[in-house]
Image (cartoon, rainbow, N blue to C red):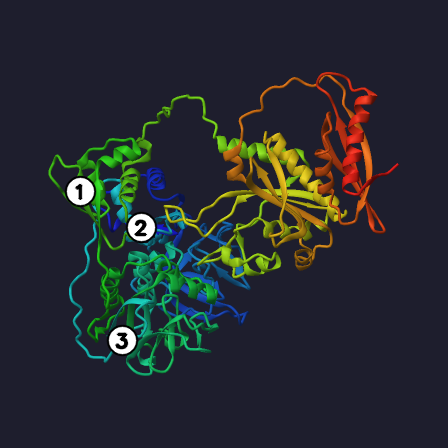
């Protein structure tokens, strides 16, 4: 954003002086970064204002002409020029020999200068050069020679006329400050920063018509158009703007067009309120309607592009057609032209969110749209209209031809904030006086209701142009930035160095994750959101889940009540890379029951999944063994697995509840074949779920120390023929109850089926704490096992 320093100074006292460096430093520290200060017109040397006295054709070139120019010296200058927009009596910039201009073939950023010298062009001596705005470094406009206003004095040094400092402010940090997208807003900040007075007075004199042009305004959509003011002016003369106005626009990067358009742009840059001018006589009737676009409606805008409109795009219309896209750009069918005599000036306030949406839909960014989408002050429309009318009457003539039309059905009130001055010290650590704080707030045009001298509470009324101030902390920030961050004394933070307390829940969670990792599991993270399709595939009921009012997508519109759908969803992705894998997730699920605070109960669960190409029963026992190992390493002793059949997503004959101290803490099993088919999973898969909260409540600190058994253990692999319907779990349970004296462990090794029989291989471990086992000891326990096998009609293979 470009700000003219000369323009700023009209709002500051005459004696206000500050160095460029101080201005840049203080504004950067208190408001927004000043990226650079540029001397506007500093490169212009030996360039004077000239008047064209005579134009004659070049004797040897039809494309060139010889221009006799008076530059205020005794000798008139003969200059050869190819521009077609010249006429006798025109005031133009003339670069004399020794002067430097920019090469028009390069962009302004290149700074490629050409030195002017006397030269002979096709037999005619040329002693100077007539300049365009681009050659002077003022804009990218190179369409012709810059025609200066008639009142410009011949012989004046252009560098003196143009001399200004342009302040380039990085405005991305000012998106919450629409008031600062103007010279008045920046001047208000500069006045507060440098503790001087703002020289600004609102024009409140009534605009009384001396002619009569009928004009009616109807606002059909008051949601998108909060306020609409307009006035008609009769008898204007369209011509170039005065030099001072053109220079103001050029210094801020805006191309001058004509006096009416320039006046509206000037007010926008001056006060921050976008305006628009319509040619009154191009309206079908003197009736302006503010409405949204109709289906299939189009408009050709000022840039010559026909645009397809959406039904929520707000338009300014006459009874027959759209004449502008509200707050963004005007229509070509109502633009100001050279023959325009009567105009309508619009000063309105449009809703920021609809304006931003329309701008994005149309792919059209304009200076006006940028300001409206930040949220303009509706109380600025009338002062801006008054100032625009005053300026237009001055530079374009004419007469006010209608009353001011002001449609404002729902005026906004001002905000009031109760502010405890002591909060400044609490939040910032500085102690400015009460008077200092009040002065800072009042310098920003906040109205302060002063209390008794001893009171610390004050009431602050926030002006309507400061929509960013709503709570006391906002006021503290205002005090801090104007007081000066450089005045904050650096101090080291005070903190007691205590031994950090270990969170026992997080420590237990860490142990669970670490143990699962050592057992070969990888950790995954899945969405907390789920949907009906996922639950239907998993044979779960979605009614157990809480529905989300504003989901991130229609497919993920519930909070998960189980980890299982998320675990299964990732199987196919992993099968594309791995033949077998195991992974787990430790995360929260969300139940419909509410806490005393009115939020869902959110217990943590541990969900694990094992996928590999092996028999179902073998996979079941492998997964069971991993769960046993996990709980063993977490010091859970009284562990039991009990057969169950009621878990829908598990195989009806290969599922079990997991109990610790006779309390159910989870379940495990092979995934139901129907579920595998729904998820298109081609390999056998087992899962387990553990209730983390219950595990934590049952956890034991550490096992009691017991010495390592110094006597050797003996292992035997036994292959046992049993009926096909006999489960490995039933066999292991029978063997564990065989009455063996030295039995320590039974581990399932393999399962083999042949015909109507099944061979289950188990590894048994025998060990004594008092002696080394003899052959007789081992034989005794093996005989007990043989008897137990016989009871279930089994047979130990030779």
Earlier residue among tags 3 and 2: 3
Give the camera-side residue of 153 and 443. 443
- Marker disc for residue 716: none
User: Secondary structure beneath disc 3?
Assistant: strand
- Residue depicted at x 65% and y 17%: 707
Q: Which residue is mark 2?
A: 468
- Marker disc for residue 458: 1
Give the camera-side residue of 627 and 117. 627
- Residue depicted at x 67% and y 40%: 624
Discs 1/2, front: 1
Left or right? Give the position of 103 relative to 618.
left
Earlier residue among tags 3 and 1: 3
Q: Quadrant of residue 241?
A: bottom left
Q: In the displayed structure, would residue 50 be above or below residue 426?
A: below
Distance from Cα at disc 3 to Cα at disc 2: 31 Å
Left or right? Give the position of 229 relative to 746.
left
Residue 127 lies, in percent from the top left, at 46, 57
Quick one: label 1, few (<14), some, or many (20+) residues within 10 Å? Answer: some
User: Secondary structure beneath disc 2?
Assistant: loop
């Amino acid at each position: 954003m470009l700000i003219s320093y000369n323009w700023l100074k009209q709002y500051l006292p005459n004696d206000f002086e500050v160095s460029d460096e101080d201005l840049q430093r203080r504004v950067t520290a208190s408001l927004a970064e000043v990226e650079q200060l540029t001397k506007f017109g500093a490169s212009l040397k030996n360039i004077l204002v000239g008047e064209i006295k005579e134009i004659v054709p070049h004797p040897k070139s039809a494309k060139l002409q010889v221009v006799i120019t008076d530059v205020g010296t005794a000798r008139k200058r003969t200059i050869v020029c190819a521009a077609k927009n010249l006429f006798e009596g025109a005031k133009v910039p003339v670069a004399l020999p020794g002067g430097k201009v920019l090469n028009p073939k390069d962009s302004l950023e290149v700074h490629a200068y050409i030195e002017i010298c006397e030269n002979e062009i096709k037999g005619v001596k040329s002693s100077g050069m007539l300049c365009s705005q681009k050659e002077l470094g003022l804009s990218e406009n190179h369409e012709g020679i810059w025609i200066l206003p008639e009142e410009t004095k011949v012989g004046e040094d252009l560098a003196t006329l143009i001399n200004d400092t342009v302040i380039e402010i990085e405005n991305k940090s000012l998106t919450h400050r629409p008031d600062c997208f103007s010279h008045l807003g920046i001047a208000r900040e500069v006045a507060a920063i440098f503790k001087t007075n703002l020289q600004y007075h609102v024009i409140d004199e009534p605009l009384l018509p001396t002619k009569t042009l009928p004009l009616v305004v109807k606002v059909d959509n008051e949601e998108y158009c909060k306020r609409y003011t307009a006035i008609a002016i009769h008898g204007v003369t369209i011509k170039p703007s005065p030099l001072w106005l053109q220079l103001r626009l050029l210094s801020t990067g805006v191309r001058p067009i004509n006096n009416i358009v320039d006046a509206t742009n000037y007010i926008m840059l001056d006060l921050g309120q976008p305006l628009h001018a319509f040619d009154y006589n191009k309206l079908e009737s003197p009736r302006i309607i503010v409405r949204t676009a109709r289906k299939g409606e189009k408009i050709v805008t000022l840039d010559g592009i026909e645009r397809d409109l959406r039904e929520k795009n707000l338009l300014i219309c006459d009874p027959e057609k759209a004449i502008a896209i509200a707050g963004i750009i005007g229509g070509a069918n109502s633009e100001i032209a050279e023959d325009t005599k009567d105009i309508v000036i619009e000063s309105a306030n449009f809703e920021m969110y609809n304006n931003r949406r329309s701008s994005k839909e149309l792919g059209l960014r304009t200076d006006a749209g940028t300001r409206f989408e930040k949220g303009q002050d509706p109380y600025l429309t009338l002062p801006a209209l008054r100032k625009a009318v005053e300026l237009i009457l001055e530079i374009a003539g004419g007469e006010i031809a209608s009353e001011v039309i002001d449609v404002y059905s729902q005026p906004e009130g001002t905000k009031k904030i109760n502010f405890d001055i002591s909060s400044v010290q609490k939040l910032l650590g500085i102690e400015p006086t009460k008077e200092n704080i009040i002065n800072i707030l009042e310098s920003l045009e906040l109205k302060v209701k002063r209390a008794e001298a001893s009171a610390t509470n004050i009431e602050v009324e926030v002006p309507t142009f400061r929509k960013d101030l709503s709570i006391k902390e906002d006021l503290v920030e205002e005090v801090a930035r104007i007081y000066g961050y450089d005045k904050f004394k650096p101090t080291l933070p005070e903190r007691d160095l205590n031994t950090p307390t270990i969170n026992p829940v997080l420590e237990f969670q860490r142990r669970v994750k670490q143990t699962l990792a050592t057992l070969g599991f990888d950790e995954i993270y899945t969405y907390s959101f789920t949907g009906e399709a996922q639950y239907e595939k998993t044979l779960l009921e979605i009614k157990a889940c809480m529905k989300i009012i504003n989901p991130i997508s229609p497919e993920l519109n519930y909070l998960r009540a189980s980890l299982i759908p998320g675990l299964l969803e990732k199987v196919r992705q992993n099968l594309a890379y791995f033949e077998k894998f195991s992974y787990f997730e430790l995360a929260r699920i969300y139940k419909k029951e509410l806490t005393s605070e009115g939020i869902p109960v959110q217990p943590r669960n541990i969900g694990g999944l094992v996928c590999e190409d092996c028999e179902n029963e073998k996979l079941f026992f492998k997964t069971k063994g991993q769960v046993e190992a996990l709980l063993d390493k977490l010091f859970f002793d009284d562990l039991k697995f009990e057969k169950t059949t009621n878990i829908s997503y598990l195989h009806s004959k290969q599922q079990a509840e997991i109990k610790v101290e006779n309390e159910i803490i989870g379940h495990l099993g092979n995934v139901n074949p129907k579920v595998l088919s729904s998820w298109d999973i081609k390999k056998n898969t087992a899962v387990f779920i553990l209730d983390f909260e219950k595990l934590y409540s049952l956890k034991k600190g550490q096992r009691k120390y017991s010495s390592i058994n110094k006597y050797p253990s003996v292992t035997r692999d036994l292959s046992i023929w049993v009926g096909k319907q006999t489960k490995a779990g039933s066999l292991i349970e029978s063997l564990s109850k065989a009455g063996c004296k030295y039995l320590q462990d039974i581990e399932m090794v393999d399962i083999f089926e042949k015909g109507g029989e099944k061979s289950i291989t188990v590894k048994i471990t025998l060990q004594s704490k008092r002696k080394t086992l003899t052959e007789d000891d081992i034989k005794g326990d093996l005989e007990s096992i043989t008897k137990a096998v016989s009871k279930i009609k089994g047979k130990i293979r030779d």
